[in-house]
Amino acid sequence: MNDGVNGVALAVFIFFFVLVTAMGFLAARWRRAANEHSLDEWGLGGRSFGTWVTWFLLGGDLYTAYTFVAVPAAIYAAGAAGFFAVPYTILVYPLIFTFLPRLWSVSHRHGYVTTSDFVRGRFGSKGLSLAVAVTGILATMPYIALQLVGIQAVLDVMGVGGGEDTNWFVKDLPLLIAFGVLAAYTYSSGLRAPALIAFVKDTLIYLVIAVAIIYIPIKLGGFDDIFARASEAYGETNPATGAPRGSLVPGEAGQWTYATLALGSALALFMYPHSITATLSSRSREVIRRNTTILPLYSLMLGLLALLGFMAIAAGVEVSNGQLAIPQLFENMFPAWFAGVAFAAIGIGALVPAAIMSIAAANLFTRNIYKDFLRPDATPAQETKVSKVVSLLVKVGALAFVLTMDKTVAINFQLLGGIWILQTFPALVGGLFTRWFHRWALLAGWAVGMVYGTVAAYGVASPTQKHFGGSSEEIPGIGEIGYIGLTAFVLNALVTIGLTFVLRAVRAPEGVDETRPQDYTADAGDPGVEVELPPATAGSAH
Amino acid sequence: MVTPARVVIGLCLSAPFVAMLWVGSYARTDPAFIGIPFFYWYQMLWVLVSTALTVVAYKLWQRDQRARAAARGGARR
């Protein structure tokens, strides 16, 4: 599909890219606090964002290359099954509404920056805190990898980097450059860079969606035609599996998969370190709840974008790698300059979350592994330095995923991350509401969930891959096909509850809980709640 | 403490789960809306419905908080 470089599109793309890069570097000066070398300042932007900035930040994390590339690609490939992303994002908001204000309160009372901080403070267990930290870093990597796949898809369609026949370095050079720019400005500006760039990103995205969703269906003859042609295409037999390619509605057998994928993804989303980072950097718990009433705007966008998968089929886009379907559709349908704008939207839409994710993973490492286990006496300046370096390393780890793993089903990157991160749910959300669970039981449940989830995912084969080929497996005892992450989570919860009864019966030591019930409902303005001012030294608030 | 307002908040927040996880209730193509099969427009409609429900929950919760603050005699905000 690489019929030469699309010069105009590339020029427009580069223009926006230079613009956001400049903004990224300037962001370091935006609303700067007194002490820029503290981790709170670099990693949480000083924690003073209001409703709209928080909205942009959360949107920046939640709606990513996953939305623009992976979900439409899943629809392009198989139809209805890929649409689970819409109920998934619908279910996220009631969950955020219920859980995250409590986390905000207790974090701002005790100076917690990460979920691990909270778990350690709540359960007095360094082991459990380490488990949460490791899981967070591990689960973030495939999610960042998904973003890089999105950028790569755009560059591929623009004709940059050459096809499969050039050597790997030329092929991946643009990806490496994009990666380098991202790394550099994240390194220098911390969370302020993505927060500011998010404005450009969202403006571009809304523009592109509005145009795409009106212009393309008109050009294709309306939704009737689009769905008729898609339905025809799904009826054709896939030579690799011998079954029809997909369907317009999930069949009886696919409904369990659909529901478990939606629920599992929704439960997993706000466990990710980067979702937590964005939440904690808001000014008050009010801001979080108010956000759940405006965030669904993004869900509507997601649904509309997903429909682009059908439009790609109707427009006759034929790609072997499904991730290229949407960029290719844009190139076919739009004039070159607007294709450039659309590519910039996708590209920047992948960069912002990648930056936020790597910062969050880096915070986790520094606070809960470096400081707790390696250098307890580290100075704030050292902490910030380590965080910056780790944020680079996490991105390199993600790059390794992209360069070595199969990219034709990118949505599996995210689902794989979900399987892991979901195993921290009992400790975090359980901990927010009750101290009943025993810390050792939580650790055992986590281990069981992690092992089951990883082994089950490893065992899933696809036509193109022997291992990690998918994220759904038969649910033991029910016999239906369901999301592995949710099954692992249920196992995790059962083990946790069972062992808690046992450990309580034998009076195993419970650990010290440094939080009090009223900490979970405290708001900005209450005594002891830090709002605008970061602590004088990172982590000194314990 | 269970109050009527809190029951309503609970219902508002749990309704999307029932509606969305019961896939069988909407896994069909008819009736279509401007050419979009039922399965798709119904779920997108639920984005708006669940948003409305969350707004209701938020407003009720705000009132609930204010009432509680007033009851404590410390209506500072």
Image (cartoon, rainbow, N blue to C red):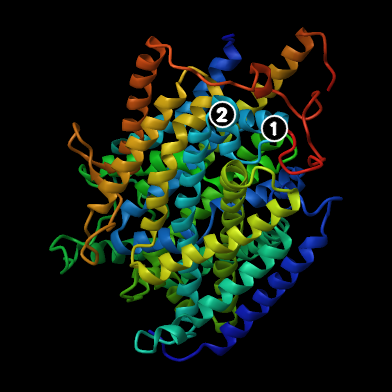
Q: Amino acid at mark 2?
A: Thr
The quadrant of the image that shows the N terminus of chain B is top right
Give residue A205's quadrant in the image. Answer: bottom right
Q: Amino acid at mark 1?
A: Arg
Name the one closer to the observer, A534 or A52.
A534
Name the one closer to the observer, A444 or A163.
A444
User: Badge 2 is on which residue?
Assistant: A98
Label 1 to label 2, Cα distance in Å?
11 Å
Q: Chain of mark 2?
A: A
Which residue is rendered at x = 48% and y = 17% of the image? A509
Which residue is rendered at x = 71% and y = 32% of the image? A542
Q: Position of residue A233 (x, y in %)?
A: 25, 66
Q: Position of residue B77 (x, y in %)?
A: 83, 23
Residues at circles 1 and 2 in contact by the CB criterion of under 8 Å = no
Which label sits on residue A285? 1
Q: Residues within 10 Å of mark 2 (few under 14, many from 20)?
A: few
User: Element type at marker 1?
Assistant: helix
Q: Is residue A222 visible?
A: no
Work out which residue is located at the far left of the displayed protein and give it.
A242
Q: Is A14 left or right of B15, judged from the image as shown?
A: right
User: Element type at marker 2?
Assistant: helix
